[in-house]
């Protein structure tokens, strides 16, 4: 699955061909650059991308509550998804939510909270307004079954966050958070995704989460890493900030 959040500095509705071009390049494995004689100009777009790929598996459903500027979001996802909006409407925070997911899966929730600030910086309008931060993802690689992950974070008196509850599910429905779920409560780090669980459902979830990659190409200044030269041999894997994008594109020629 490829999720793009696009902000066009001028009229975002003026040229649908630009958006279709981005989708075409995404399907070709190109995130942002010059290819085939066609150039996406750096001064026209800020592109944030979340790319997830694991065989033919993908996130079918995403739910977010109480995260930064996102009060409540419920969305079904397809293979390619384009989000369009003006500056400051929450596209970056949606991408940031996947960074939170990655931190939870890597047993680094506490480090993520410290790097982001404290609970007041992560909860929607802070702790006085929002008590919990929660998320729900449903993964599927076929038409008959799925796997799901639910979590809820609560704040501590010191301003941190901990996992108040989390659950793994199999063959679940979007609007039922109890049937076919197994719940765990009150941990600093994930118990389901900690690498020690022998539950088959948890093993599937860990494989899904391990495939999450986040590419955040938001810096278009003259000092941006995207504008710097790079080693032409540095093309094994695209870096999250795009610093080796020229090498990766050269490999594709």
Image: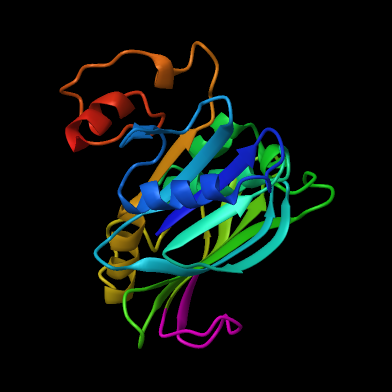
| Residue lying at the far right of the rendered structure | 128
Q: Which of 229/135 is in front?
A: 229
In the shown orientation, is residue 18 left or right of residue 210?
Answer: right
Looking at the rendering, which quadrant does residue 142 occupy? bottom left
- The residue lying at 57 percent from left, 34 percent from top is 45
The quadrant of the picture occupied by the N terminus is bottom left
> Does residue 171 show up magenta in the picture?
yes
Q: Which residues are magenta?
A: 170-184
Rendering coords of residue 162 (x, y %): 57, 51
Q: Considering depth in this image, is 239 or 32 the residue closer to the camera?
A: 32
Residue 8 picture quarter: top right
Closer to the camera in the image, 110 or 68: 68
Q: Main secondary structure of the magenta part?
A: loop
| Image position, residue 10 (x, y; %) | 71, 34
**Which residue lies at the image location 22% right of the left edge and 29% below the top edge?**
250
Residue 159 in view, yes or no: no
Residue at the image position 24 percent from the left and 36 percent from the top? 237
Image height of 115 relative to 200, above or below: above
Outermost residue toward the front in this view? 37
Q: Is residue 15 left or right of residue 242?
A: right
> Which residue occupies 58% across, 62% down?
135
Q: How is the image coloured?
A: rainbow
Which of the two residues, 152 or 102, is positioned nearer the viewer here? 102
Q: Pinpoint residue 213: horizontal percent, then vertical percent.
A: 37, 46
Left or right of residue 114: residue 126: right
Quarter that holds the C terminus: top left
In magenta stretch: residue 181: yes
What is the count of numbered marks?
Answer: 0
Image coords of residue 88 (percent x, y): 73, 39
Whether residue 156 is visible here, answered yes or no, is yes
């Amino acid at each position: 699955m490829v999720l793009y959040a696009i902000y066009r500095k001028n009229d975002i509705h003026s040229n649908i061909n630009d958006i279709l071009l981005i989708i075409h390049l995404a399907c070709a494995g190109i995130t942002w650059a010059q290819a085939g004689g066609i150039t996406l100009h750096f001064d026209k777009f800020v592109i944030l991308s979340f790319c997830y790929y694991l065989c033919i598996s993908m996130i079918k459903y995403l739910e977010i509550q109480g995260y930064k500027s996102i009060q409540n979001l419920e969305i079904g996802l397809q293979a390619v998804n384009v989000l369009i909006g003006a500056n400051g409407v929450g596209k970056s925070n949606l991408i940031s939510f996947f960074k939170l997911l990655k931190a939870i899966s890597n047993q680094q929730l506490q480090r993520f909270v410290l790097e982001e600030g404290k609970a007041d910086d992560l909860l929607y309008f802070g702790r006085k307004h929002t008590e919990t931060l929660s998320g729900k993802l449903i993964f599927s690689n076929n038409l008959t079954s799925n796997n799901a992950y639910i979590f809820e974070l609560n704040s501590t008196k010191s301003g941190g966050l901990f996992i108040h509850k989390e659950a793994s599910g199999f063959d679940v429905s979007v609007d039922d958070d109890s049937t076919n779920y197994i719940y765990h409560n009150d941990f600093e780090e994930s118990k389901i995704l900690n690498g020690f669980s022998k539950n088959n459902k948890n093993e599937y979830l860990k494989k899904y989460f391990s495939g999450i990659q986040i590419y955040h190409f938001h810096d278009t200044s003259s000092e941006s890493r995207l504008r710097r030269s790079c080693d032409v041999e540095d093309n094994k894997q695209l870096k999250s900030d795009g610093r080796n994008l020229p090498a990766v594109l050269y490999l594709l020629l």
